[in-house]
Image (tube, rainbow, N blue to C red):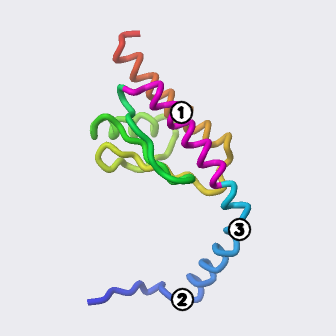
Amino acid sequence: TIGVSPQAGSPLACAAGASTMRAINAGVVEHTKEAGGVLHDALSGLIDQFPEYVVATHGVGLYRTLEFQSDGLAGEFVTTVRKQGLLVAPPAGSTLTLNPTLICSEQEIKRGVDMMGAALLEWYERDNNF
């Protein structure tokens, strides 16, 4: 059986798709590259600062992953940052996927990564009896 969405090909869906394609211009693409570099550098800083929790980051542009030492740490991290107000998707195993909007500012990226860093610092202080 071949499944087809009842919305596929509808005038509204086509108009939304066409509008999106018009909005993705060279400026948005360039911004995504630059913002992706900021995100990559900031996540790499977390790995350098907290290697006992976070081991790697991968991705391109604003589509990034953050890999934790274990599945349990990734799940606990999501719970911790959500309490701080940062909305992240549930992890897939030990990997957390991060994909902010294409139009997010560098300040918003840094704020989000700062929130992640605060959660990791909280863990570090807890685990090292500070």
* Secondary-structure class at tag 3: loop
- Graded by Cα atoms within 10 Å as few (under 14), some (14 to 19) or many (20 or more), the crowding at tag 2 reads few
Q: For the stretch drawn in magenta, what is the main secondary structure? A: helix
Left/right of residue 116 with respect to residue 30 in the rendered view: left
Q: Amino acid at mark 1?
A: Met
Which mark lies nearer to you, 1 or 3?
A: 3
Q: Who is closer to the viewer here, 121 or 10?
A: 121
Left/right of residue 124 with respect to residue 39 in the rendered view: left
Residue marked by disc 2:
10
Q: Amino acid at mark 3?
A: Asn
* Secondary-structure class at tag 1: helix
* Secondary-structure class at tag 2: loop
Assign the C terminus to one quadrant of the image: top left
Q: Residue at x 59, y 55 (%)?
A: 101
Q: Residue at x 68, y 40 (%)?
A: 107
Please report whichever mark, 2 or 1, sits nearer to the chain's N-terminal start: 2
Which residues make up the magenta segment?
32-51
User: On screen, 27 above or below 58?
Assistant: below
Q: Are marks 1 and 3 in contact (CB under 8 Å)?
A: no
**Spatial separation of the CA atoms under disc 2 and disc 1:** 41 Å
Question: Does 55 appear in magenta?
Answer: no
Residue marked by disc 3:
25
Question: Does 48 appear in magenta?
Answer: yes
- Graded by Cα atoms within 10 Å as few (under 14), some (14 to 19) or many (20 or more), the crowding at tag 1 reads some
Q: Who is closer to the viewer here, 100 or 39?
A: 39
Q: Amino acid at mark 2?
A: Ser
- Graded by Cα atoms within 10 Å as few (under 14), some (14 to 19) or many (20 or more), the crowding at tag 3 reads few
Q: Residue at x 26, y 90 (%)?
A: 1
Rendered image: mark on residue 115 = 1
Q: Are marks 2 and 3 in contact (CB under 8 Å)?
A: no
Query: Residue 128 appears at what percent x and percent y?
Result: 36, 13
Please report whichever mark, 1 or 3, sits nearer to the chain's N-terminal start: 3
